[in-house]
Image (spheres, coloured by chain):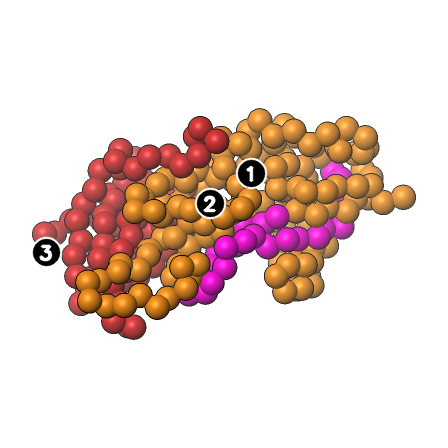
Protein backbone atom coordinates (compact mmCIF):
# COMPACT_ATOMS: atom_id res chain seq x y z
CA UNK A 1 0.00 0.00 0.00
CA UNK A 2 2.91 2.34 -0.67
CA UNK A 3 1.86 3.52 -4.12
CA UNK A 4 -0.21 6.67 -4.55
CA UNK A 5 -3.10 6.28 -6.98
CA UNK A 6 -5.44 8.62 -8.75
CA UNK A 7 -8.98 7.39 -8.09
CA UNK A 8 -11.65 8.46 -10.55
CA UNK A 9 -15.13 8.08 -9.09
CA UNK A 10 -18.65 9.50 -9.05
CA UNK A 11 -20.82 10.65 -6.18
CA UNK A 12 -24.48 11.36 -5.43
CA UNK A 13 -25.59 14.97 -4.98
CA UNK A 14 -28.57 17.04 -3.92
CA UNK A 15 -30.19 19.88 -5.88
CA UNK A 16 -31.96 22.70 -4.09
CA UNK A 17 -33.45 24.61 -7.08
CA UNK A 18 -37.05 24.12 -8.23
CA UNK A 19 -36.13 24.11 -11.92
CA UNK A 20 -34.33 20.95 -12.98
CA UNK A 21 -32.08 21.27 -15.99
CA UNK A 22 -29.87 18.57 -17.48
CA UNK A 23 -28.46 16.20 -14.88
CA UNK A 24 -25.24 14.27 -15.17
CA UNK A 25 -22.78 12.66 -12.85
CA UNK A 26 -19.75 14.72 -12.06
CA UNK A 27 -16.49 12.78 -12.06
CA UNK A 28 -14.20 13.33 -9.09
CA UNK A 29 -10.50 12.60 -8.67
CA UNK A 30 -8.99 11.70 -5.33
CA UNK A 31 -5.30 11.07 -4.69
CA UNK A 32 -4.04 8.71 -2.04
CA UNK A 33 -3.05 5.30 -0.77
CA UNK A 34 -5.74 2.86 -1.81
CA UNK A 35 -6.95 -0.36 -0.28
CA UNK A 36 -9.93 -2.54 -1.11
CA UNK A 37 -11.97 -3.59 1.93
CA UNK A 38 -14.80 -5.93 0.94
CA UNK A 39 -17.04 -3.96 -1.39
CA UNK A 40 -15.56 -0.62 -0.35
CA UNK A 41 -12.47 1.28 -1.48
CA UNK A 42 -10.50 3.08 1.22
CA UNK A 43 -8.51 6.11 0.05
CA UNK A 44 -6.06 7.57 2.56
CA UNK A 45 -5.04 11.11 1.63
CA UNK A 46 -2.22 10.81 4.12
CA UNK A 47 -0.85 7.80 5.93
CA UNK A 48 1.35 7.22 8.91
CA UNK A 49 5.00 6.46 8.24
CA UNK A 50 6.43 3.70 10.42
CA UNK A 51 9.69 5.10 11.74
CA UNK A 52 12.64 2.96 12.70
CA UNK A 53 12.77 2.32 16.42
CA UNK A 54 9.19 3.47 16.98
CA UNK A 55 6.73 0.67 17.67
CA UNK A 56 3.52 0.95 15.64
CA UNK A 57 0.57 0.50 17.97
CA UNK A 58 -2.06 2.13 15.76
CA UNK A 59 -5.06 0.25 14.35
CA UNK A 60 -4.26 -0.76 10.73
CA UNK A 61 -7.74 0.43 9.73
CA UNK A 62 -7.23 3.90 11.21
CA UNK A 63 -7.61 6.67 8.61
CA UNK A 64 -5.92 9.99 9.42
CA UNK A 65 -7.80 11.69 6.57
CA UNK A 66 -9.49 10.12 3.59
CA UNK A 67 -12.55 8.69 1.88
CA UNK A 68 -14.41 5.42 1.83
CA UNK A 69 -16.29 4.91 -1.44
CA UNK A 70 -18.40 2.04 -2.79
CA UNK A 71 -16.34 -0.03 -5.23
CA UNK A 72 -19.12 0.62 -7.74
CA UNK A 73 -18.37 4.36 -7.54
CA UNK A 74 -15.25 3.83 -9.64
CA UNK A 75 -15.72 5.45 -13.00
CA UNK A 76 -14.53 2.30 -14.74
CA UNK A 77 -17.36 0.28 -13.15
CA UNK A 78 -20.06 2.93 -12.93
CA UNK A 79 -20.36 3.66 -16.63
CA UNK A 80 -21.50 0.15 -17.54
CA UNK A 81 -23.63 -0.59 -14.47
CA UNK A 82 -27.09 -2.05 -15.03
CA UNK A 83 -30.03 -1.91 -12.61
CA UNK A 84 -32.76 -4.29 -13.87
CA UNK A 85 -35.15 -3.34 -11.02
CA UNK A 86 -35.73 -0.01 -12.76
CA UNK A 87 -37.28 -1.72 -15.78
CA UNK A 88 -40.53 -2.32 -13.91
CA UNK A 89 -40.89 1.05 -12.15
CA UNK A 90 -42.72 3.87 -13.89
CA UNK A 91 -41.58 7.47 -13.86
CA UNK A 92 -43.51 9.53 -11.26
CA UNK A 93 -43.92 6.50 -9.01
CA UNK A 94 -43.30 6.84 -5.30
CA UNK A 95 -40.16 4.86 -4.55
CA UNK A 96 -37.97 3.68 -1.74
CA UNK A 97 -34.26 3.58 -2.50
CA UNK A 98 -31.53 2.02 -0.43
CA UNK A 99 -28.06 3.11 -1.49
CA UNK A 100 -24.45 3.25 -0.38
CA UNK A 101 -22.84 6.64 0.02
CA UNK A 102 -19.31 8.02 -0.10
CA UNK A 103 -18.06 8.97 3.35
CA UNK A 104 -15.31 11.39 4.32
CA UNK A 105 -13.27 10.06 7.23
CA UNK A 106 -11.03 12.05 9.56
CA UNK A 107 -8.98 10.47 12.33
CA UNK A 108 -11.09 7.39 12.87
CA UNK A 109 -11.24 3.65 12.25
CA UNK A 110 -13.71 3.21 9.42
CA UNK A 111 -13.56 1.01 6.32
CA UNK A 112 -17.14 0.80 5.12
CA UNK A 113 -19.61 3.12 3.44
CA UNK A 114 -22.70 4.73 4.88
CA UNK A 115 -26.06 3.20 4.00
CA UNK A 116 -28.83 5.62 3.06
CA UNK A 117 -32.61 5.18 2.78
CA UNK A 118 -34.52 7.62 0.58
CA UNK A 119 -38.22 8.02 -0.08
CA UNK A 120 -39.39 10.20 -2.97
CA UNK A 121 -40.74 10.33 -6.52
CA UNK A 122 -38.83 8.67 -9.37
CA UNK A 123 -38.46 11.71 -11.61
CA UNK A 124 -35.88 10.75 -14.20
CA UNK A 125 -33.84 7.71 -15.27
CA UNK A 126 -30.65 8.28 -17.24
CA UNK A 127 -27.99 5.82 -18.41
CA UNK A 128 -25.90 6.10 -15.26
CA UNK A 129 -28.12 7.80 -12.67
CA UNK A 130 -31.63 8.34 -11.38
CA UNK A 131 -33.23 11.55 -10.11
CA UNK A 132 -35.51 11.41 -7.09
CA UNK A 133 -37.88 14.36 -6.53
CA UNK A 134 -38.73 15.62 -3.03
CA UNK A 135 -36.31 13.17 -1.44
CA UNK A 136 -36.44 12.42 2.25
CA UNK A 137 -33.30 10.65 3.26
CA UNK A 138 -32.22 8.90 6.42
CA UNK A 139 -28.76 7.52 7.03
CA UNK A 140 -29.34 4.06 8.44
CA UNK A 141 -25.72 2.96 8.92
CA UNK A 142 -23.48 3.31 10.87
CA UNK A 143 -25.61 5.55 13.09
CA UNK A 144 -29.14 6.54 12.11
CA UNK A 145 -29.44 10.22 11.16
CA UNK A 146 -32.82 11.57 10.07
CA UNK A 147 -33.29 14.45 7.62
CA UNK A 148 -30.01 14.03 5.82
CA UNK A 149 -28.75 16.44 4.56
CA UNK A 150 -29.62 19.70 6.30
CA UNK A 151 -32.12 21.88 4.45
CA UNK A 152 -34.75 20.53 2.11
CA UNK A 153 -33.43 19.42 -1.28
CA UNK A 154 -35.81 19.35 -4.23
CA UNK A 155 -33.96 16.58 -6.06
CA UNK A 156 -31.43 13.87 -5.34
CA UNK A 157 -29.19 12.48 -8.08
CA UNK A 158 -28.00 8.95 -7.30
CA UNK A 159 -25.59 6.94 -9.47
CA UNK A 160 -27.34 3.70 -10.44
CA UNK A 161 -24.30 1.82 -9.23
CA UNK A 162 -24.83 3.08 -5.65
CA UNK A 163 -28.33 1.58 -5.43
CA UNK A 164 -28.67 -1.72 -3.63
CA UNK A 165 -32.47 -1.75 -3.75
CA UNK A 166 -35.18 0.33 -5.40
CA UNK A 167 -38.88 -0.46 -5.27
CA UNK A 168 -42.15 1.27 -5.95
CA UNK A 169 -44.43 2.03 -3.02
CA UNK A 170 -47.91 0.68 -3.66
CA UNK B 1 13.42 23.29 1.04
CA UNK B 2 13.20 24.12 -2.66
CA UNK B 3 10.47 26.60 -3.62
CA UNK B 4 7.56 25.02 -5.48
CA UNK B 5 4.98 27.28 -7.07
CA UNK B 6 1.40 26.32 -6.21
CA UNK B 7 -1.01 25.77 -9.04
CA UNK B 8 -4.23 23.94 -9.72
CA UNK B 9 -5.82 23.03 -13.00
CA UNK B 10 -8.37 25.85 -12.88
CA UNK B 11 -5.77 28.45 -13.80
CA UNK B 12 -3.44 26.85 -16.33
CA UNK B 13 -4.79 23.39 -17.02
CA UNK B 14 -1.92 21.85 -15.10
CA UNK B 15 -1.65 20.67 -11.51
CA UNK B 16 1.38 21.01 -9.29
CA UNK B 17 1.62 17.73 -7.40
CA UNK B 18 3.72 17.44 -4.26
CA UNK B 19 4.72 14.62 -1.96
CA UNK B 20 4.80 15.74 1.67
CA UNK B 21 6.29 14.35 4.83
CA UNK B 22 4.67 16.03 7.81
CA UNK B 23 5.30 15.75 11.53
CA UNK B 24 1.89 15.56 13.21
CA UNK B 25 0.91 17.02 16.57
CA UNK B 26 1.09 13.45 17.89
CA UNK B 27 4.78 13.48 16.87
CA UNK B 28 4.18 10.77 14.28
CA UNK B 29 5.35 11.17 10.70
CA UNK B 30 2.75 11.25 7.91
CA UNK B 31 3.07 11.27 4.13
CA UNK B 32 0.78 12.01 1.23
CA UNK B 33 0.56 13.29 -2.35
CA UNK B 34 -1.78 16.05 -3.46
CA UNK B 35 -2.17 19.24 -5.46
CA UNK B 36 -0.36 22.26 -4.02
CA UNK B 37 -3.14 24.85 -4.05
CA UNK B 38 -1.63 27.79 -2.21
CA UNK B 39 1.38 28.98 -0.28
CA UNK B 40 0.72 31.90 2.03
CA UNK B 41 1.18 33.00 5.63
CA UNK B 42 3.51 30.08 6.36
CA UNK B 43 0.79 27.59 5.39
CA UNK B 44 0.61 25.24 2.43
CA UNK B 45 -2.87 24.22 1.29
CA UNK B 46 -2.95 20.83 -0.45
CA UNK B 47 -5.94 19.38 -2.29
CA UNK B 48 -6.65 15.64 -2.25
CA UNK B 49 -10.08 15.40 -3.86
CA UNK B 50 -11.44 17.52 -6.70
CA UNK B 51 -14.44 17.61 -8.99
CA UNK B 52 -12.97 17.36 -12.47
CA UNK B 53 -15.90 19.05 -14.25
CA UNK B 54 -15.46 22.41 -12.57
CA UNK B 55 -12.15 21.98 -10.71
CA UNK B 56 -13.82 22.58 -7.36
CA UNK B 57 -11.65 21.28 -4.55
CA UNK B 58 -13.74 19.04 -2.31
CA UNK B 59 -11.17 18.00 0.28
CA UNK B 60 -7.99 19.82 1.21
CA UNK B 61 -5.68 20.11 4.19
CA UNK B 62 -3.55 22.97 5.44
CA UNK B 63 -0.02 22.30 6.67
CA UNK B 64 2.10 24.76 8.62
CA UNK B 65 5.50 25.04 7.01
CA UNK B 66 7.23 24.28 10.29
CA UNK B 67 5.39 20.91 10.41
CA UNK B 68 6.70 19.89 6.99
CA UNK B 69 9.77 17.72 7.17
CA UNK B 70 10.13 17.34 3.41
CA UNK B 71 8.25 18.35 0.29
CA UNK B 72 9.07 17.46 -3.30
CA UNK B 73 7.33 17.98 -6.60
CA UNK B 74 6.10 14.83 -8.34
CA UNK B 75 4.95 14.25 -11.88
CA UNK B 76 1.22 13.87 -12.35
CA UNK B 77 1.87 11.04 -14.78
CA UNK B 78 3.66 9.03 -12.12
CA UNK B 79 0.33 8.12 -10.50
CA UNK B 80 -1.60 5.14 -11.83
CA UNK B 81 -5.37 5.24 -12.12
CA UNK B 82 -6.87 2.83 -9.61
CA UNK B 83 -9.35 0.22 -10.73
CA UNK B 84 -9.13 0.52 -14.49
CA UNK B 85 -8.92 -3.22 -14.87
CA UNK B 86 -11.58 -4.10 -12.25
**How far apart are the two marked residues, 2 and 3, measured between alpha carbons?**
35 Å
Q: Which chain gets the red colouring?
A: B
- Given the image, what chain letter belongs to the residue carrying mark 1? A
| Disc number for residue A72 | 1
The location of residue A143, given as percent across then percent down, is 63, 65
Circle 1 Cα neighbour tier, 10 Å, few/some/many (<14 / 14–19 / ≥20):
many
Corner quadrant of residue B8:
top left
Residues at marks 1 and 2 on the same chain = yes
- Residue under pointer 3: B1
Q: Residue A3 appears at what percent x and percent y?
A: 30, 43
Decide whether residue B2 is among the magenta residues.
Answer: no
State the SS at label 3.
loop
Q: What element carries label 1?
A: helix
Q: Where are the magenta residues, as a range?
A: A100-123
Q: Same subunit under labels 2 and 3? A: no
The chain letter under disc 2 is A
**Chain A, colour shown:** orange
Question: Crowdedness of circle 3 by 10 Å Cα count: few (<14), some, many (20+)?
Answer: few
Amino acid sequence: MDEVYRVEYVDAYYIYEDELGETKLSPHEAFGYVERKGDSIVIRFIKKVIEEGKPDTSDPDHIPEGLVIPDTALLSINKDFKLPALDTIRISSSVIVTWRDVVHVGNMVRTDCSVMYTEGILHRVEDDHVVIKDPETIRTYPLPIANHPGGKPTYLVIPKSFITEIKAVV
Amino acid sequence: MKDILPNDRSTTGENTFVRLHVRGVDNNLYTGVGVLLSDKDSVYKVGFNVSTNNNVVIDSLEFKKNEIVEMEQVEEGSMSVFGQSL
